[in-house]
Amino acid sequence: MAKLFKVLVELYELLLTTRKDDRSGRVVSTGSLRIDDLIAIAVSRRSDINAATMKASYEILKEVVLEEVCGAKQVEFGLSHYGLGVNGVFIGDHPVWDGKTHSLILHASATAEARMALKNIEVDVLGMAQSGIFINSLTDVVSGEINTRLTPGGSVNLAGARIKIAGDAPNIGLHLTEINTGTITDIPATSVPVNDPSRIIFIVPTDLPAGDYKLSIITQFSHSTLLKEPRTCVFDYILSCIA
């Protein structure tokens, strides 16, 4: 019998429709795990395989997958299928590749096994979220990619609800956290030319190191008056910076 799971869903204002009572749902996260965390869990279930062996095997497989995908193979790894895609428009029948206009992207789609597992999840809808703040999408203007990339020196469009940066509490603002090192890069207010309740535009630091980042907003914004305590919204997607 398949293992049953349960997740909680909170509701947020849906600003893309004309109905005042339309809502979007977001799964309440129960935490974040890295490969070492997963290996520790796996080892606790399989005492015949040690952590070092499992980590080495994973690193070897990951390297092989990356090489094959970069060689234009369609590859299944873990719970996803991977393959290359192309961003950008070509003019005419014999154009040349322009790195400023065109880019390769990595497509990932869930395997049948992953999709079937979703059917064993029970969902409990909690109602409206208390904070009401969320980031709906992030667009990297330079590459045109959505929810995937940050380009040093380029601008980024954020869309959401109640995301305006306001208040004087510590750490108010936009922050990028490198997920492997924990290093936090603050986005200065001078790099945020648009700061509205449903839209923010900011400039990525030109010296942002290459890596994978989580974006967070800390704000005291409210429709009427500033909140006494700041609220934090962490974007769901991991953003890659290629310096």
Image: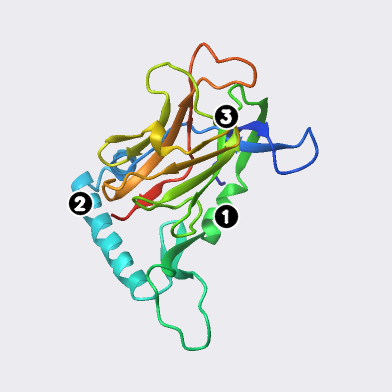
**What quarter of the picture does the C terminus occupy?**
bottom left
Question: Disc 3 or disc 1, which is closer to the eye?
Answer: 3
For mark 2, give the secondary structure.
helix
Name the residue nearer the viewer: 137 or 41: 137
- The residue located at (44%, 60%) in the rendering is 143
Disc with the residue nearer the chain's start (1 vs 2): 2
What separation in Å lies between label 3 and label 2 (alpha carbons)? 43 Å
Checking the image for residue 133, the label placed there is 3
Residue 224 showing in the rendered view: yes
Q: Residues within 10 Å of mark 2 (few under 14, many from 20)?
A: few
Residue 45 showing in the rendered view: no
Q: Is residue 205 left or right of residue 74?
A: left
Q: Can you name the residue that lies furthest to the top here? A: 228
For mark 1, give the secondary structure.
helix
**Residue under numbered circle 2:** 53
Disc with the residue nearer the chain's start (3 vs 1): 1
What separation in Å lies between label 1 and label 2 (alpha carbons)? 29 Å
**Residue under numbered circle 1:** 115
Q: Amino acid at mark 2?
A: Thr
Q: Position of residue 89 (x, y in %)?
A: 52, 73
